[in-house]
């Protein structure tokens, strides 16, 4: 690995971790699409700040542009409060306007400086190491590492310091308000973090990828655990894995690093969606299947138990009679009987079924329930 | 360029006519289907669908090597469909909520589209030129066959919508009732979403992936302010969509370095702003005016009652009081002088030569009526 390669991966990993932290709370608070709105709207802030500061990686630009993100949140809320449009429509109305103004400003006035829509929208991580951070003339690494590292630290600090408040405001806003924590303050604090993170990451990875890194890893982590602390840790790990895996995939295919990171994050989500231990599709299917067989076993034992020792038992307790009585298809009835035999619940002799002690206790349990 | 000249060019200039027609079709179709999306609170589904179209376009090009509009549109529709189904299955089978699923699909599909686009661009025999116009749209590059494709697909979508108008209306306002009377709600839902996918994909070439969602939300949000009837709302939404589409596309294709998508979005957003401010009944300007008028009436009534109170404390019925006294008594502490002028014009109060005020007999009657009315309300 060459030095720029290591540096790119370092930046990607820091960006992913920085995005995953506030992303967890966005997902839990059902505001994931706010990241979409903010990451688009800050384009306007970036353009305006760029006209003044003339340096895309400057920390001042990050702060100035982040103000647009918070403005977006405030605008969406103001628009919703008029009662004229619903919240989802308000989001869909606000950010396209701000984004459009940003795009038009870029294409009209910034055509020949280092700021074009593609770079801002799509990001170009490969160029990130070119902007160096120098102290007293000594090169101490890419500027992005320091800017994004600072943002990551800020996010971490906010979450550690206000963990209790965030948790409460996220899961029970009413109780938080009643106890005197201001949910509004927490809300805007979080939105400020999202905005700052989005602006910082913009330069390195582009606006759409910011959304991917804020939403996909927490969504996957949400399927893996019920514990907030663990969800945060899993999100960061999945984010960093997407960043590094995405980098190497892009390297192999010679394609966009940002897009490849988003794709990897998506694939990791799909993997979790399918295979998560409790909430994955496979686990759900397995559980349903087990329940289906278990239910059939109980049906069978209860049916046999009811007719046990009765005069009609010789008729009712035949395997081929199950079709008429419980309306099971003949082959399904056969499979249920095999399953019940494996469980030592029944014994079959010349097509006649007899309950074992084990089978009787299953039936009694089912009847009591 | 003056209006007559513009009108002539719209009729006779090939580029401008194509651009205007294409944008009008896009505006009508997305306006109509957007109305349903907004009413069903699916405004942001449009955002997700338009982003998912990007990998569809890229894949269609990679597989067929063709840039025919119908091929790319087919790819986009297919990808939009896959994305929508993925959103639905994630929401239905996990605890993940719709906002998260939409954000996920939107960004991941877009990222994947980006991977494919960059991949195509870096092929040595690259003939991708024109694929990246799908990002922000390029109305000036519309050709007659694009417009023809848009018109045919759009007409098909609108026909289906009209044929199932009653069903879709019920689905949008009361899906439970629709299910109770035996309508196949799930199929209708999928069908309506498919129509939305078609509407969005039609606009991608003109407005672009990133901003197409605004064409779904904004015309409908504007139309909603003017009416409470679905039919009128849909018609207005189509009209607004077309108006914004044509004006935005024409402005951008006659001005250098003005990307189409953003220009159309600003036009349609201006319509939304105008509607929210000035639409009768719901407009905010009328609401503010109403509030101001109510506030004025309240202050005037309060001043009248204050004068009445004061007059009860004095034997002479025309005992006059300085405005300062009234201002001190007034709860809202504002608008006393104006209220006095207004009350005077109604003949309820009169001023003495020194500028003090007293009640006229009519004013006394009015004030006692008001006080009785209020006490009646209070009890």
Image (spheres, coloured by chain):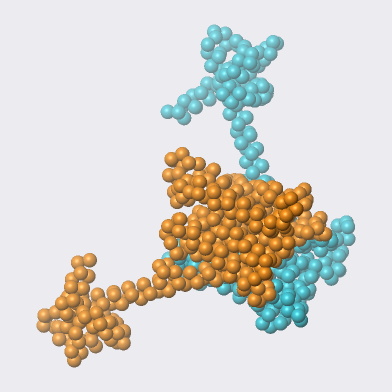
Quadrant of the frame with the C terminus of chain A: bottom left
Q: Quadrant of residue A13?
A: bottom right
Query: What is chain B's hue in the picture?
Result: cyan
B90 on left or right of A62: left
Q: Nearer the viewer, residue A205 or B29?
A: A205
Q: Nearer the viewer, residue A363 or A260?
A: A260
Q: Nearer the viewer, residue B161 or A201?
A: A201
Residue B172, position in %: x, y? 53, 62
Q: Any idea which chain is the orange one in this picture? A: A
A345 on left or right of A128: left
What's the residue at 24%, 75% (across, down)? A298
Residue most extreme to the top = B315
Quadrant of the frame with the N terminus of chain A: bottom right
Residue B195, position in %: x, y? 60, 70
Q: Nearer the viewer, residue B71 or A361?
A: A361
Residue B268 appears in view: no
What's the residue at 81%, 63% (across, down)? B253
Residue most extreme to the bottom = A350
Residue B142 appears in view: yes
What's the residue at 47%, 72% (across, down)? A274
Q: Quadrant of residue A282?
A: bottom left
**Looking at the image, is B326 positioned above or below residue B253?**
above
B160 on left or right of A143: left
What's the residue at 45%, 58% (across, down)? A230
**Looking at the image, is B270 positioned above or below residue A10?**
above
Q: Quadrant of residue B123?
A: bottom right
Residue B297, position in %: x, y? 60, 29
Q: How many marks?
A: 0
Residue A121, position in %: x, y? 69, 62
């Amino acid at each position: 690995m060459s030095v720029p390669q290591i540096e790119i991966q370092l930046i990607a990993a820091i960006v992913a971790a920085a995005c995953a932290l506030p992303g967890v709370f966005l997902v839990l608070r059902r505001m994931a699409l706010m990241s979409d709105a903010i990451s688009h709207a800050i384009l306007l802030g970036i353009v305006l700040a760029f006209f003044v500061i003339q340096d895309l990686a400057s920390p001042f630009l990050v702060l100035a542009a982040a103000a647009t993100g918070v403005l977006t949140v405030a605008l969406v809320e103001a628009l919703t409060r008029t009662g004229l449009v619903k919240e989802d429509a308000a989001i869909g109305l606000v950010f396209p306007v701000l984004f459009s103004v940003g795009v038009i400003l870029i294409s009209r006035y910034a055509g020949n400086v280092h700021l074009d829509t593609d770079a801002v929208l799509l990001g170009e991580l490969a160029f990130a190491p070119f902007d160096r951070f120098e102290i007293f003339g000594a090169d101490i690494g890419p500027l992005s590492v320091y800017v994004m590292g600072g943002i990551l630290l800020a996010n971490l600090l906010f979450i550690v310091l206000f963990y209790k408040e965030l948790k409460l405001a996220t899961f029970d806003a009413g109780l938080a308000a009643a106890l005197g924590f201001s949910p509004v303050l927490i809300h805007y604090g979080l939105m400020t973090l999202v905005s700052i993170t989005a602006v910082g990451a913009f330069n390195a990875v582009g606006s759409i990828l910011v959304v991917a890194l804020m939403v996909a890893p927490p969504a996957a982590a949400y399927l893996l655990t019920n514990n907030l602390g663990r969800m945060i840790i899993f999100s960061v790990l999945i984010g960093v894995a997407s960043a590094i895996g995405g980098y190497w995939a892009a390297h192999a295919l010679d394609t966009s690093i940002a897009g490849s990171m988003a794709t990897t994050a998506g694939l990791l989500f799909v993997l979790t969606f399918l295979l998560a231990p409790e909430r994955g599709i496979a686990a759900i299917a397995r559980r349903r299947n087990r329940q289906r067989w278990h239910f059939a076993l109980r049906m069978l034992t209860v049916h046999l138990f009811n007719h046990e020792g009765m005069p009609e038992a010789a008729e009712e307790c035949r395997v081929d009679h199950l079709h008429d009585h419980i309306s099971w298809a003949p082959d399904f009835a056969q499979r249920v009987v095999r399953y019940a035999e494996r469980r030592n619940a029944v014994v079959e002799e010349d097509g006649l079924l007899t309950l074992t002690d084990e089978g009787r206790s299953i039936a009694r349990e089912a009847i009591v329930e | 360029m003056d209006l007559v000249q513009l009108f002539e060019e719209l009729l006779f200039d090939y580029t401008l006519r194509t651009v205007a027609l294409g944008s009008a079709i896009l505006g009508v179709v997305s306006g109509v289907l957007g109305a349903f999306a907004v009413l069903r609170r699916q405004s942001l589904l449009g955002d997700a669908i338009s982003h998912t179209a990007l990998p569809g376009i890229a894949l269609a090009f990679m597989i067929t090597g063709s840039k025919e509009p119908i091929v790319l549109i087919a790819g986009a529709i297919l990808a939009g469909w896959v994305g929508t189904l993925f959103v639905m299955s994630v929401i239905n089978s996990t605890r993940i909520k719709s906002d998260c699923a939409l954000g996920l699909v939107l960004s991941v599909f877009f990222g994947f589209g980006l991977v494919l686009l960059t991949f195509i661009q870096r092929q040595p025999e690259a003939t991708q030129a024109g694929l990246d116009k799908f990002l922000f749209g390029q109305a000036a590059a519309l050709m007659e066959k694009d417009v023809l494709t848009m018109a045919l697909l759009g007409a098909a979508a609108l026909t289906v919508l009209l044929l199932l108008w009653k069903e879709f209306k019920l689905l949008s306002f009361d899906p439970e009732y629709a299910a109770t009377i035996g309508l196949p709600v799930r199929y209708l839902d999928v069908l309506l979403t498919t129509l939305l996918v078609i509407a969005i994909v039609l606009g991608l070439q003109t407005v672009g992936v990133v901003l197409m969602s605004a064409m779904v939300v904004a015309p409908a949000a504007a139309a909603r302010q003017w009416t409470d009837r679905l039919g009128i709302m849909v018609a207005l939404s189509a009209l607004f969509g077309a108006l914004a589409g044509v004006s935005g596309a024409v402005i951008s294709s006659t001005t250098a370095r003005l990307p189409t998508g953003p220009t159309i979005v600003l036009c349609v957003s201006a319509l939304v702003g105008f509607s929210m401010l000035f639409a009768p009944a719901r407009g905010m300007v009328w609401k503010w005016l109403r509030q101001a008028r109510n506030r004025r009436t309240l202050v005037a009534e309060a001043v009248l009652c204050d004068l009445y109170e004061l007059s009860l404390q004095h034997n002479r019925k025309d005992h006059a009081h300085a405005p300062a006294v009234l201002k001190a008594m007034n709860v809202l502490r504002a608008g006393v002088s104006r209220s006095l002028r207004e009350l005077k014009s109604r003949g309820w109060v009169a001023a003495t030569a020194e500028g003090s005020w007293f009640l006229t007999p009519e004013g006394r009657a009015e004030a006692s009526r008001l006080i009785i009315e209020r006490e009646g309300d209070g009890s």
